[in-house]
Amino acid sequence: MNANDLDTPAVTIALGVMEETIRRAQAYYDEHGIAFRPHIKTHKIPAIAHKQIAAGAVGITCQKMGEAEVFLAAGLKDILIPYNIVGAQKLERLCNLAKQGTITVSVDSEYTARGISEAANREGVEIGLEVECDTGMHRAGVQTPQEAADLARVIARLPGVAFRGWMTYPTTRETVAFFEVASRLIERDGLKAEIRSGGGTPGMWQAHEALPTVNEYRAGTYVYFDRNSVGADAATWDECAMLVHMTVVSRPTQDRAILDGGSKTLSSDGVGGGQKGYGRIVEYPDAVIYAQSEEHDHVDLSACPPDRRPDIGERVTVIPNHCCATTNLHDEVYGVRQGKVEVVWPVLARGKIR
Ligand SMILES: Cc1ncc(COP(=O)(O)O)c(C=O)c1O
């Protein structure tokens, strides 16, 4: 089937573009001796993770346990979950994962570390722990190198868990100093942060600047890239592999078109880098998706030349602002090569938020 014959809305992945990105990213990390651990929350498709591992990735990153369960069952056995795992039900599931693979988790409190330790000890498994450090994002994470070192010392004494190192998101200007001070503080206790993990697509091509301190990197969005990646200068439009195919279903005025997408198709995530709207219409780059309903995208055509505007029934392709959020809205995506659908991938970890 041709991609242009797919009923809309439909999400396609340009296979050649994605494969080249996987190759190029891995080559960059190999060249610099940085371990690469792609984040699968972008594609949520085990077949793509297997391509990333085949290219040379050391393992994968999953944000949620539900994602890790899907990927482990699909044969991906080395998984980092950079998330604080709290609560009895999740701890039981975490131990089940650790019985089948190599599982590392990040923690930012003694409470969370002790919970994992008790569960792992009871179940007779070992779980690797990285201390999550807040190096500027102000999300989770210990706030100072001293707190990081104190937590590492606690972990080192707990049964069922092993201290592996530091984790932060994203890598920032403060990351190197934070990790170095924390590492020095634990040296005198005979402890070493073997893994010092950073991440984020916007800074993925500058990862070598944080060497040798940051020795592992997690990027997710890179596998498809999106409008935000282009806005951050991490990619060009031609390197964006995910396209959302839509049909123009109404032209209520000369300056307005309506597409059969909307927030339930494209997501309503915003965009940076001085850009506007909810996605880039490839065929009409001057058009702006200025508003959304659940099932309609509202397009302002006033910046397009009067003789170059889409008609009712015409198909367009849209590069989303944030491809990870778009992925999570779709049951399947279509892998396309030279205009033909080569593979239909169910988005197996779609909606795995627990
Ligand atoms: C902990 C963590 N690591 C890595 C990533 C990957 O970032 P990006 O999608 O920018 O590559 C994310 C993204 O949210 C994250 O939260």
Image (cartoon, rainbow, N blue to C red):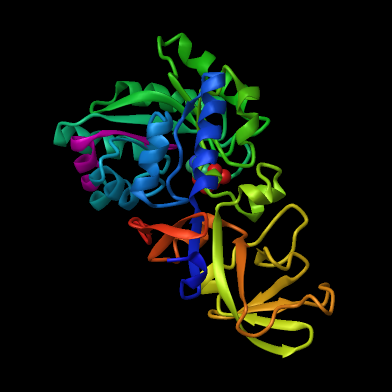
Q: Would you place residue 324 above or below residue 10 in this image?
A: above
Q: Name above or below for residue 155 compared with residue 73.
A: above
Magenta-drawn stretch contains 101:
yes
* Vertical order, 301 against 113 (above or below): below
Q: Is residue 158 visible?
A: yes
Q: Residue at x 64, y 85 (%)?
A: 312
Asked whether 81 or 11 is in front, the reply is 11
Query: How many numbered discs sit on the rendered protein?
Result: 0
Residue 198 percent coordinates (x, y): 54, 32
Q: Nearer the viewer, residue 132 or 99?
A: 99
Left or right: where does residue 46 sit relative to residue 141?
A: left
Query: Residue 114 at what x, y percent from top left?
Result: 30, 35
Q: Residue at x 44, y 31 (%)?
A: 131
Q: Quadrant of the C terminus?
A: bottom left
Q: Residue furthest bottom?
A: 252
Q: Which residues are magenta?
A: 92-111
Quadrant where the image shows the N terminus: bottom left
Q: Residue at x 64, y 36 (%)?
A: 203
Query: Is residue 174 or residue 287 the one in the foreground?
Result: 287
Residue 192 lies left or right of residue 125; in this view the side is right
Res 140 visible = no
Instruction: Write down the quadrant of residue 352 in the picture.
Output: bottom left
| Position of residue 52 in the picture relative to residue 159 (left or right) | right
In the rendered image, residue 47, in percent from the top left (x then y), is placed at: 35, 47
Q: Splitting the image into 4 quarters, where does residue 263 fall?
A: bottom right
Image height of 16 relative to 127, above or below: below
- Front one among 18 and 118: 18
> Is 153 inside the magenta-drawn segment?
no
